[in-house]
Amino acid sequence: MKYMCLIYTDPNVTPTMGDKMNQAYFDLNRRMKEAGVMVAGDALHPTSTATSVRLRDGKVETMDGPFAETREHLGGYYIIDCSDLDQALHWAAQIPGAAYGTVEVRPLVVFG
Amino acid sequence: MIDATLARVMQEDRGRCLAALVARTGDFQRAEDALQEAAASALVHWGRAGLPVNPVAWLLRAALRKAIDGYRRDATLSRHRDAIAVLALEEAADPDPQTIPDDRLRLIFTCCHPALEEKSRIALTLRSLCGLSTAQVAAVFLDAEPTMGQRLSRAKAKIAATRIPFAIPGPEDLADRLNSVLTTVYLIYTAGYAQGPQTGIDLCTEAIFLARLLVQLAPDQPEVEGALALLLLTQARAAARTGPDGQTLPPNRQDRSLWNRVALDEGLALLDRAIARRAPGPFQLKAAIAALHTADKAPDWPQIAALYARLHDLEPTPVIALNHAVALAESGQLAQALAQVQALGPRLDGYQPFHATRADFLARSGDHAAARPEYLRAIALAGSDADRTFLQARLSALK
């Protein structure tokens, strides 16, 4: 089953993405690939770069900024393929962002 | 006769059957539905053909067939071909509950998974392993039955959607997950202890049943033995905790002749066995504290204080710090105890035992003026008449 790990962090308390932090993510990516669980994973630019779009009455409305103004921002994600929730939580706990933010783990819906 | 037998089987063997069905269907809701349908058809068949030789085996086999039917009815049949094949084999093998493995340990690990809300863990455990009806579980929480039904459904849906495993955790997770299970059992016990048998369901007995089941299914685990010891050592003294006029009695005024010696001895023996395994944990520490309360003549307070200090290292909660302070005060270190309690104010404000303890310490330090409002606060927060009567008497004794 595939799980999405959404990495939420508060930019005010998050250490800057220095070499050490990058290395921690690179190491995790390597371990996930070796274990065969890695499907995808990316870091996102900060919410200051976000643009929100919605369609109302057939008209596209474009707005500067993220969908919701919250203290914790979505900073990145992983999609991992695991046998069960325990295994998914085991990997999620190793995401460096879990040490100072929160990682939300949700299963992907399988259609058909 | 038929009704009574079915009711008894569904109460006593529900957990065992449900665990076997979840193990085979891999789906909590399907297993529960299948068992319910099997019970309904038992009423019809047993009424017509008489009681089967082995009612539990009959129910299990019928439930497996119902589960297969359930999969066949499902619109997405193609996805369930493997499940049906497995169940058909199981059903053909004529399962006998006496010989199939007891899967209840796996079931309780699923019910008490930390990904579920604490209240849902308690509710699922009572429903699935203790055989309580949804209405009874609702009564425990003073919830309406439909509300509890929804909570149980949501929990089962989460188990299925997120694939919470139906398995005994691996060695690296075992200690944490076992703690989650034991905490759930302990919370069931404390809920029963606090509310008494007013709901018609004795939760203390249910909790002790669960702890015994865990000792049997997960043998040689010192924390499991410690948890059962803790419950037995607490339960053994339950009859002595209130006086003839219904007020709560402090341990030093309890009539020890009312203690249940059999439960006490069993608890002490279990604790000895657990400690001999040399892997201490919070439940063993709590059981050891309960054991010291039963020491000859009077509790060994300095030793109790030392154990609370160790427990606080493992579980640094304000309630444990409060209990540590009580033990310090009883050991003659009142000034230090009062200072420790005063420091807990911001975190325990509104917690009745905190105000009762602070009132007691202030009164014993001679500061009756400060003790008075604390007693009033504690009385306002008291959850039972027994506690209120006790605190009222202490308040009246102030100068």
Image (cartoon, coloured by chain):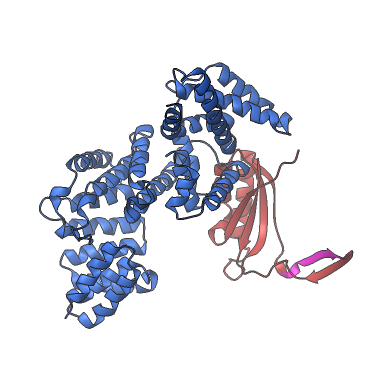
Q: Residue furthest left?
A: B297
Where is residue A76? Give x, y as percent.
67, 57
Residue B342 in picture, x, y percent from top left: 30, 74
Q: Residue furthest bottom?
A: B369
Q: Which image quadrant: the C terminus of chain A?
A: top right
What secondary structure do most residues of the magenta stretch adopt?
Answer: strand
Q: Residue at x 42, y 45 (%)?
A: B181
Magenta stretch containing residue A51, yes or no? yes
Q: Quadrant of residue B165?
A: top right
Q: Residue at x 33, y 72 (%)?
A: B380
Q: Quadrant of residue A73?
A: bottom right
Specify the chain shown as red: A
Q: Position of residue B117 (x, y in %)?
A: 51, 52
In the image, the chain rendered in blue is B
Depth order, front residue of B138/B91: B138
Q: Residue at x 42, y 30 (%)?
A: B4
Residue at horizontal 58%, vertical 48%? B154
- The quarter of the image holding the N terminus of chain A is top right
Read off the magenta span.
Answer: A48-57
Residue A105 versus residue B128 in the image, above or below: below
A88 or B256: which is nearer to us?
B256
Q: Is residue B289 left or right of residue B24?
A: left
The residue nearer to you, when weighing B151 against B279, is B151
Res B281 visible: no
The answer to whether one can see residue B266 in this image is yes
Residue B7 shown left or right of residue B198 in the figure: right
Taking B345 as reference, is B6 left or right?
A: right
